[in-house]
Amino acid sequence: MRVILVDDSRAMRMILRRIVGQLGFEIMEAEDGQAALEAVTNSENVPDLALIDWNMPRMNGLELVCALRDDPRTRDMTLVMVTTEGEQSQIVRALAAGAHEYVIKPFTSDSMVEKLALLGLVPNEAENAQTGA
Amino acid sequence: MTLQTAPTIEDLGEIAEQVWSSYLDPEGVNPLLPFEPGDSEKTRTRGESICASVSITGAWHGHVVVSCSALAGRHAAAALLAMEVPEVAQQDVVDALGELANIVGGNVKSTLPAVCMISLPHVISGVGVDSHWPAATQVCELVGEWLNEPVSISVWQSRSDRAEAAS
């Protein structure tokens, strides 16, 4: 499984990297929506999952979700918004645009793994290792 | 339309607790220790400090500011980037504090009436950089110590916004 982490903060990408790395994902990173779109469309292997911040320079997360949904090569990717935009109206906008799930910062490692497990993206043994079950 | 609603120090305390437990102190051994309002002066940074802010516009206008000593900034960057403090570079501190301001600001925005927008973070460092919002008034501040270093989270509302709300 491949994931692309899209956030203008290196610190947040590092936090996400620690979580998905433990789940066995192959990881790509991009520091804004435009860079992510270029990386994904130029990649031979389109990632299975994108974790996408909302507020970024050049192209924001919502625009990236729309662009990925519009492209036949990337429209089957699982898209998760990971953002501080916690208002109901923003969540509805993101889901309507094509995001599958929505994670509000700050989040714990366990809560992120739980969200990914709900999307069927976490092998059971990895989930159990994360949660200590 | 301008609304009078503003976040409270209790709101800031809840947000800070979530941020610390998620990223800066996941083991629960070094929490942010808030001071009583009367004690806030002793947390003022005397030397170099770092100050990260986001601006909020829309139904409410103002800024959310996270400031701390340079050493606390290095500790925050080390925690977020999984590094040792001596390895932390200034750019790491700028990135980490910017993200903390983004997270705190986004959660403050959630306490405000819709519709508000949040800016990308702005980070400055130096001596005496924590009080330079001449067109805004501080409406609440959470001050405390983290790892024996001063930390402040504050919300500033535009003066014209407040004047309009009062009229």
Image (cartoon, grey):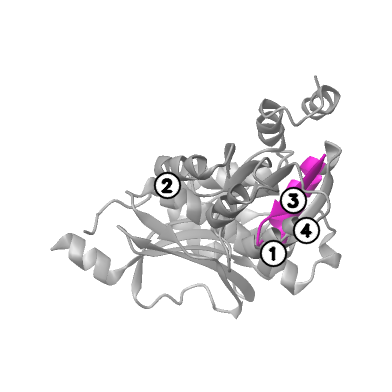
Q: To which residue does mark 3 refer?
A: A4
Please, is residue A71 above or below residue B18 in the view? below
Label 2 to label 4, Cα distance in Å?
28 Å
Residue tagged 2: B110
Query: In the figure, B80 relative to A78: above or below?
Result: below
N-terminal label among 3 and 1: 3
Q: In which quarter of the image is the N terminus of chain A?
A: top right
Q: Residue A13: say if magenta.
A: yes
Q: In this view, does B122 lie to the left or right of B38?
A: right
Percent position of residue A109, x then y? 72, 37
Q: Identify residue type, mark 3.
A: Ile
Give how far across and how far down residue B40 sits, in percent.
49, 59
Disc assigned to residue B78: 4
Residue at 84% x, 27% y is A129
Q: Are marks 1 and 4 in contact (CB under 8 Å)?
A: no
Residue located 55% across and 47% down the image? B16
> What's the residue type where badge 4 is placed?
Ala
Residue A5 colored in magenta in the image: yes
The numbered dot on residue A35 is 1
Identify the image quadrant of residue B92.
bottom right
